[in-house]
DNA sequence: AGTCTTTGTCGAAGCGCTTCGACAACCTAT
DNA sequence: ATAGGTTGTCGAAGCGCTTCGACAAAGACT
């Protein structure tokens, strides 16, 4: 293992000079710099991370806490994680992967040990037990998701309320007066992850403004659960012509059920999904959807965090504006049977 | 930030004593140990990771290199990553998340800087450019996946050849004589990731042994691609009664197409999938499948790695035996039309 | 020519921990 | 009672780096 000292010796300068070449914190003459850089290359020198962390008191590591459960949005989580990792690298940071399993202890451990300089939390609950810890430390952090109280916190999320509103608007504009919302799994609501409620909030208030009838039902993924929910919805509101689906693993089952019942999409029934674009495009019907901008969220989170680490950067809530892409699963509401 | 020295002072012992209490590398009297532990708790002490890494020359971090692309098996990747992270924690390790983006440079950087003590590589290609680096270093590593040449490497993977064989066997035993294999996306074969070829190998050789006709077609995910492939397969082999599907995002499209054609599953056609159990259970037909044991692979990889780090542990290839679970998508081949 | 900056380099201290050798203090066996 | 082991604790060195203050050397002024 090559050390700074060896590089210094090889280049015929002192260790501190090499350090300054590396960090650029003091001016170094061009000739010296080149000599040092040459030596670094020749020797294949890599600064020792531990020593660096010890001396500079920063590790250049960002901790990313992902949820342990895989009951929802797995591809979204993955995409966020990858976006975080790649964006972090462009800023010179590496990413430490923590699972939610350890809970608050992980936060304590990481902040306490100086393992990471900052952290990103995913899957934040409305009243998350990790929040007091974050507020009580000077370690920068960013949440992906929105807790109930955001004071003193930086958060990045899709504007789910606007998302809900957008879905209703789109269907209302097409003439649909009876809309059913296939929500997330009941467990998601019970956990108070917030985004589902916020979506519902947006759906409801816009529906009211536009005079549209709305029926919301949570729904587990898979065919069986969707079949049950579907039957109930039609029973209660036989005139339903528009569906908004938030649980991405209920989308395909819903389409299958509609097909089975002889209801054509989009002629008889329109479907709007809230899901990653890839899912919308790969479905059996190309779905009109509001995308979940996973990459953007990951990127944003890291950039906020880096800004904080560099001193500029304030606590603030970044809500990404939703975008609805019209595909072939929505169309004008059918004329009312007379 | 509380330091070892402060704990020592608080407990009225020397710093080295505290260190030995923490590491257990020398015997400490019960009374002293308790006093130190008490101080640690009272002060909320956490050892500084950088200092520890510098002094002990180990970081207690395992690097996990995940593929950047998300064109296949995203949930599997995610599950492996989570399993790696949780298993690593139980052994006192944290996980550093690297994307494949940096390629071999990431390997150099991590080994060179002592950032991680060991690494796990996913999505290994048959002739991966990172392999020479791994062989040339003394840093332990484990691959998830199988390259062409495994000498000097430790690998963990599902036994895909046996998996292929198992699928054919199952269908053959049910009387199917004409089997179509819906493979991974063409890009996967072009990339030479190996597992797809190994599966095919198993399928083919077993098919030959059992006198079953086999038609293999790569297939992108989604409905459109599957529709094209499906039409071609039926055109070429109209008598096909058994399907083996490896690309999990082609499963649902295939089922839809079969339904559309009025072919009942499993009465007219049997379908075996190679996919995580969750997918098999959530599909529109409960699928007979060979599970991809993501968790087990992640866990195994970490345990091999930890064994190596602790000195025992040898280079070896661990192939996990496939298990076929019979559900409701396979049944006896229909009687031949006379 | 002499003073004042500026620029480039160096030496040394210190970050918080591990670990080695030293050494009292206490047993145990003769 | 004495030599020989244990056992528990300490002091000090050192891991590889950053960073501060010092200080020559060179340039910019009167």
Image (tube, coloured by chain):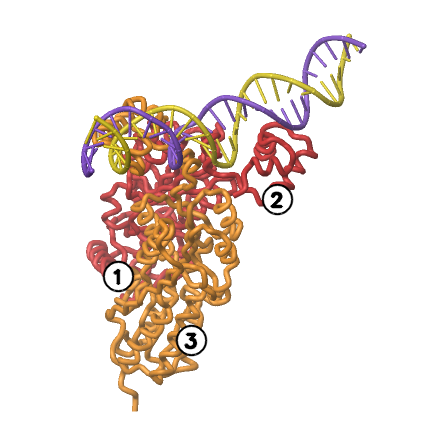
Chain colours: A red, B orange, C purple, D yellow
Estimate the x, y position of residue A191 in percent, counting from the top left.
24, 43
Cα gap from disc 2 to disc 3, whole angstroms: 49 Å
Number of other residues with Cα within 10 Å of mark 3, as a class: few under 14, some 14 to 19, many 20 or more? some
Number of other residues with Cα within 10 Å of mark 2, as a class: few under 14, some 14 to 19, many 20 or more? few
Cα gap from disc 3 to disc 1, whole angstroms: 29 Å
Q: Is residue B150 above or below residue B65?
A: below
Residues flagged by tags 3 and 1 on a common chain: no
Of all chains, the one bearing label 2 is A
Residue A326 visible within the image: no
For label 3, the residue is B216
Q: Within the image, what quadrant is residue A242 found in? A: bottom left
Task: Please give the name of the residue rendered at 26% of the width and 46% of the height, measured from the top-left corner.
Answer: A188
Task: Please give the name of the residue rendered at 23% of the width and 27% of the height, measured from the top-left corner.
Answer: B35
Identify the image quadrant of the C terminus of chain A: bottom left
Depth check, mark 2 against mark 3: the one in front is 2
For label 2, the residue is A41
Q: Is residue C28 above or below residue A220?
A: above
Number of other residues with Cα within 10 Å of mark 1, as a class: few under 14, some 14 to 19, many 20 or more? many
For label 1, the residue is A223
């Amino acid at each position: 293992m090559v050390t700074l000292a060896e590089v210094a010796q090889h280049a015929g300068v002192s260790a501190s000079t090499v350090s300054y070449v590396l960090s650029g914190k003091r001016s170094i003459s061009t000739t010296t710099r080149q000599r040092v850089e040459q030596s670094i290359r020749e020797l294949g020198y890599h600064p020792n991370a531990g020593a660096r962390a010890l001396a500079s008191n920063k590790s250049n590591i960002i901790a990313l806490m992902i949820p342990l459960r895989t009951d929802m949005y797995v591809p979204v989580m993955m995409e966020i994680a990858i976006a975080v990792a790649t964006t972090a690298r462009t800023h010179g940071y590496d990413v430490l992967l923590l699972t939610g399993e350890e809970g608050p202890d992980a936060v304590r451990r990481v902040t306490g040990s100086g393992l990471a300089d900052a952290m990103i939390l995913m899957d934040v609950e409305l009243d998350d037990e990790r929040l007091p810890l974050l507020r009580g430390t000077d370690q920068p952090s960013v949440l992906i998701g929105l807790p109930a109280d955001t004071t003193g916190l930086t958060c990045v999320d899709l504007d789910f309320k606007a998302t809900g509103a957008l879905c209703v608007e789109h269907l209302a504009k097409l003439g649909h007066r009876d809309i059913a919302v296939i929500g997330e799994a009941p467990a998601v609501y019970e956990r108070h992850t917030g985004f589902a409620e916020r979506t519902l909030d947006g759906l409801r208030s816009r529906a009211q403004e536009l005079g549209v009838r709305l029926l919301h039902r949570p729904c587990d993924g898979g065919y069986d659960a969707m079949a049950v929910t579907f039957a109930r919805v039609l029973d209660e509101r036989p005139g339903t012509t528009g569906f908004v689906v938030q649980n991405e693993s209920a989308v395909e089952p819903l389409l299958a059920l509609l097909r089975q019942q002889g209801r054509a999409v989009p002629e008889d029934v329109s479907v709007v999904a809230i899901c990653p674009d890839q899912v919308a495009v790969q479905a059996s019907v190309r779905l009109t959807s509001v995308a979940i901008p996973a990459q953007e969220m990951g990127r944003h989170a890291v950039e906020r965090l880096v800004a904080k680490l560099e001193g500029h950067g304030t606590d603030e809530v970044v809500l990404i504006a939703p975008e609805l892409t019209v595909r072939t699963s929505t169309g004008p509401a059918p004329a009312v049977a007379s």
